[in-house]
Amino acid sequence: MDRATTTPGRAPRPRWADPPFRVARMVLDALLPPRCLRCGTPVDALGSLCPDCWGQLTFLVAPLCACCGTPFEVNVGAGALCGGCSRRRPAFDRARAVLRYDDGSRPLVLSFKHADRTDAAPAYGRWLLRAARPLVAEADLIAPVPLHPWRLWRRRYTQAGLLARALAKAAGRPLAPALLARRRRTPSQGGLTAAG
């Protein structure tokens, strides 16, 4: 059976939008209400934040460095590079981040990375699409940078893979989960500064 219901002249409707699935979702939400991704306070929708936690996040928006995505305080024009990228161009063409990594975002990142909060991946994928829409629009596919097999064994899942899957789904782009392979075991980034 097809996973979507179709009506002539309309886009396919996913099965979860059918009335029995909506009722089941309402019952599940009544028994286990959706909780804020950051603090656990009950919220209206799965994969969302409460107003207090939302206010503690700093989303990175334009104007940004055309290469690394570092935010500028004032608009310095399209294609402008930050001081770091002007001095020494990175090995990549362009990169984007969703949030400033600070006291507001740290609990989200660390719980996703080390506390099995894999339920946050769909929300993070949508946020990533919003932050990197022009880059994703030019992409042929989405491919995660994998963990080394030993680190994957310790963590049990790859956060980059979950984010890539969520981003690919949100963007309607193909996912290539096994395109890249990590051969070298590199040190953990925990505790590193921007300088390394």
Image (spheres, rainbow, N blue to C red):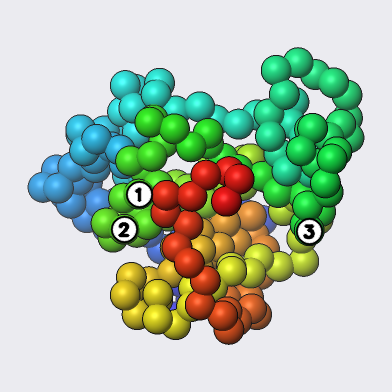
Three-letter amino acid code at disc 3? Ala
- Residue nearer the viewer, 131 or 20: 131
Could you say which quadrant of the image residue 170 lies in? bottom right
- Residue most toward the front? 195
Residue type at the position of mark 2: His
Q: Are marks 1 and 2 in contact (CB under 8 Å)?
A: yes
Between the C-alphas of marks 2 and 3, the distance is 28 Å
The residue positioned 64% from the left and 78% from the top of the image is: 180
**Local SS, label 3:** loop
Up-down relation of residue 96 to residue 139 (above or below): above
* Left or right of 36 in this view: 148: right
Q: Is residue 73 left or right of residue 116?
A: right
The residue under the point 24% across, 42% down is: 34
The percent coordinates of residue 96 (x first, y second) are 66, 44
Q: Nearer the N terminus, badge 3 or badge 1?
A: 3
Determine whether label 3 and label 1 are within 8 Å by CB. no
Mark 2 surroundings: few (<14), some (14-19) or many (≥20) residues within 10 A: few
Crowding at dot 1, Cα within 10 Å, few <14 / some 14-19 / many 20+, comes out as few
Viewer-side label of 3, 1 = 3
Which mark is nearer the camera, 2 or 3?
Answer: 3
Residue furthest toward the top?
74
Q: Is residue 120 visible?
A: no
Residue 169 occupies quadrant: bottom right
Q: Which mark is residue 114?
A: 2
Residue 46: give x, y in percent of width and height. Answer: 32, 44
7 or 186: nearer the viewer: 186
Name the residue tied to disc 3: 91
- Nearest to N terminus: mark 2 or mark 3: 3
Dot 1 amino acid type: Leu
